[in-house]
Amino acid sequence: MVPVSIAIDGPAGAGKSTVARLVAKRLNLMYVDTGAMYRAVAYLCVKDGVDGRVERAVRELLDAHKITFEQGADNGLRVFVDGLEVTARLRDPEVNALVSTVAAHPAVRSRLTDWQRDFAAHHSVVMDGRDIGTVVLPNATVKVFLTAAPEERARRRQQEYCQMGYEVSFEDIVKSVIERDKKDSERALAPLREAEDAVRIDSTDKPIEHVVNEIVQLVENAHVR
């Protein structure tokens, strides 16, 4: 049986990870959080004091450490560095600030794209990111571009920080979200953009369950279940 692949792309804070995890659970598919993969690289840079702007240094860092992934009980992706789980550290503010920078390096994207395609070749997956439908899985069964207003995305990010015990001003988060969009959209390699055959869903003021239902309906309409 040919594996099914559902690609969910969109900007930071649009709710991709939450929605993708719930869609995967509903359809009994594997959820692959590609953002967690890139965050793992950014986390390594922060932990080891490596300048994430220097591609060679980041590539050498990847060669020196072993990053592995496991499917968690909540259908999320557990991330390990040299055998130690670091999942809880992947949304630290320092990691958030660096992830777009390390993700722009061709050497990093090439290696992680290989990991992602390997997952999809052997499993039916729901995969979210910035370039899944355009670069990683251009032949995905269903493609969705999930977005939301910058202020809404900032509000969600602030809630995450509060739950983690960090205090960050809403204005600073809005600025960070807009800057992240600019970086992701303007990078030369695999920029954030909507695939021509993707279905655009705006999650602003829309309950998560409604978004999940829309995507599940798209999959059912594609006759892949």
Image: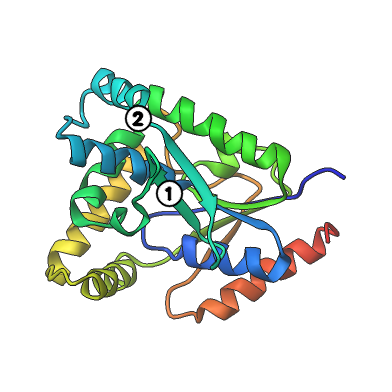
* Residue 213 located left or right of residue 69: right
Q: Residue at x 77, y 45 (%)?
A: 3
Mark 1 closeness class: few <14, some 14–19, many ≥20 residues within 10 Å: many
Q: Residue at x 43, y 30 (%)?
A: 109
Q: Position of residue 161 (x, y in %)?
A: 23, 69
Query: Can you say which quadrant of the picture contains the C terminus?
Result: bottom right
In the rendered view, tell whether residue 51 sits above or below residue 6: above
Q: Is residue 12 above or below residue 123?
A: below
Secondary-structure class at tag 2: loop
Q: Is residue 204 left or right of residue 176?
A: right
User: What colour scheme governs how the chains and residues are painted in the rendered image of this protein?
Assistant: rainbow
Q: Which mark is residue 132?
A: none
Q: Secondary structure at mark 1?
A: strand
Looking at the picture, does residue 176 appear above or below residue 190? Answer: below
Amino acid carrying mark 2 in the image:
His
- Mark nearer the N terminus (1 vs 2): 2
Within the image, what quadrant is residue 13 found in? bottom left
Measure how far apart labels 1 and 2 are at the Cα level.
Answer: 13 Å
Q: Quadrant of the N terminus?
A: top right
What amino acid type is highlighted by mark number 1?
Answer: Val
Residue 187 percent location from the top left of the image: 34, 33
Q: Which residue is mark 1?
A: 79
Image quadrant of residue 52?
Answer: top left
**Tag 2 residue:** 65
Front residue of 186 and 97:
97
Location of residue 64 in the rendering, given as x and y in whole percent from the top left corner: 32, 24
Q: How many marks?
A: 2
Mark 2 residue crowding within 10 angstroms, few (<14) / some (14–19) / many (20+): few
Relative to 120, residue 142 above or below:
below
Check the image and name the residue furthest to the front. Answer: 83
Q: Residue at x 48, y 61 (%)?
A: 17
